[in-house]
Amino acid sequence: MLRALNERAALYALLRHGAMSRVELDRAIGLSKPAAAELLRRLETSGLVCRSGFQSVRGPGPQAQLWTANIEAGYAAGVDISATSVDVAIADLGGMVRGEAKISTRGNQRQDPTQAVRTAIEEAAKSCSLQASDVVHTVAGIQGSVDPVTGHLEYATHMPRWQGFDVRQRLGAALGSAVTVENDVNLVTVDEVAGGCGRGHRNVVLLWMSRGVAVAAMVDGHLVRGSRGGAGEIDQVPFVRGESRTVGELVSNRGVLSLARQHNISAGTISAALRRGLSVPEFAAELAERVALALSSPVALLDPELVILAGDVAMAGQQALADAVTNRLHDMLAHRPRVAIAHGAAHSVRQGALHAAVGAAREEVFGRGVGEATDSGADLESWLLPPQAPAGPGEARRSR
C-alpha cells in the first residue's frame, strides 16, 4: 500500500511540474534516493513514466536523467448528450484533446440511444488513431437528472428515448468501461470552476437560462445533487407563491422574448432582445427582478461567494445584465455575492465532462493498487486538480 501511494504521489508530481530529475522528485515527495530510484524503475517497467532527455548542468559531472508521466497510459472521454446529438471529445491523461466527433441522433427513434454514444466515441477515437477500448473512463453529461437509486433519467420529458432504464448501467455495458453520468448544468459549473469565471472559487451558484432553466450549486468544492439527483431543477417551480407562472416561463429564452414584446421591443432572437432591451430602463429592471427572484432562495440558503449567469440569456446580456442583477440581488438580500457571466466556451458541457473524465482516468490509471477502484459515481469535481503529495515525515512514506 505504501509503495502504491508513493507511486501515485510521484505520478501526480510529474503531471504538475513536467519533466523532473530523480533528485527533484526526491524533494517533491520526500523519498530517499534509493527509494526514488526503485520507484522510477517500477513505474518505467509498468509503462507509467518515460525518460525525457537530460537536464543541462554547469560544470563537470554527468547530466541528470529527466522523467515524465506517460500521459498516453490511458484516455478519457467527455460526452454531451442532448435530445438531438451526441458530442464527444477524447483526451490523454495530461488533458490534451486528441479526438472529437459529433453525430446527430435525429430520426433514430428505435435505436438504443446508448449505441449512439458508443458510435460517437468510436468515431472520436478513430480520428486520433485510437480504439474505443483505450478510453478508461467516460463522463457523460445529459439534460435532466439521473436518480442515484434507480438510475432513471428524471426532469427530461423532451428525451423520451432515455427514459425507463438505468442510464449509467446501460451506458457502461455499451461502452465496456467505467462511466459517470452527470447533469449537464452541473458540468457547465465544473467547466467554469476549472477554467472559466469561477476559477479558484469553492462556493458557487450557477443559474442556467436557455430553453430551460436550472440551478447548479457547488459548496466547499462539491456539487450539490440532492437525495434523488434533482437539486437545482427549478424550471417548473412557481415563480411567486400563488402564481401559475413558473421560473422557466419567465427567465427562459421564451420568457425573455415575451417580456421584450410586452415592452414593445421587436426582436426575433435573444441576442437582439437583450441588446435593445437592456437600454430600456423598464425592461432591464423587470428582467433583473425576475433573475434576482429566481436566485434569491439558493443564494440565501447557500451564501455563495460567486453567482454565475449562464446560457443563452446570460450570453446575450453580458456585463449589463450581470450589473443589473447584482444591484437588484443586493437590494433584496443581506448576502453580497459577486455576479459574473459565464465565459461561455463552446462545448461547455462536453468540456466540463472532459475535465472530470481526465481526473477520473488519472485516478484509475495512477491509483492502481491503492485500495479499491474509484467509484464511477463519486465526487467527479474532486478530480479536477491532482492531489498534493502526502504530508508527514518522508521516512514514513518510503517504499520498502
Image: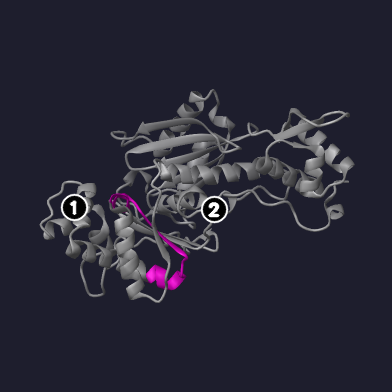
Check if mark 2's residue and mark 1's residue have beta carbons within 8 Å.
no
Answer left or right for 268 relative to 118.
left
Q: Residue furthest bottom?
A: 334
User: What is the magenta range?
Assistant: 297-316
Q: Residue at x 32, y 68 (%)?
A: 327
The x and y percentages for residue 332 are 33, 75
Q: Residue at x 47, y 46 (%)?
A: 352
Q: Which residue is mark 2?
A: 381
The x and y percentages for residue 147 are 45, 56
Answer left or right for 254 relative to 158.
left
Rendered image quadrant of residue 364? top right
Q: Which residue is mark 1?
A: 276
Q: Which residue type does callout 1 highlight?
A: Arg
Membership of 160 in magenta stretch: no
> Is residue 1 at all visible to an observer of this figure?
no
Q: Which residue occupies the foreground of this view, 49 or 370?
A: 49
Q: Residue at x 46, y 51 (%)?
A: 192
The x and y percentages for residue 384 are 57, 49
| Callout 1 secondary element | helix
> Is residue 304 at all visible to an observer of this figure?
yes
Q: Which residue type does callout 2 highlight?
A: Glu
Query: What crowding class fits label 1: few (fewer than 14 Cα within 10 Å), some (14-19), or many (20 or more)?
Result: some
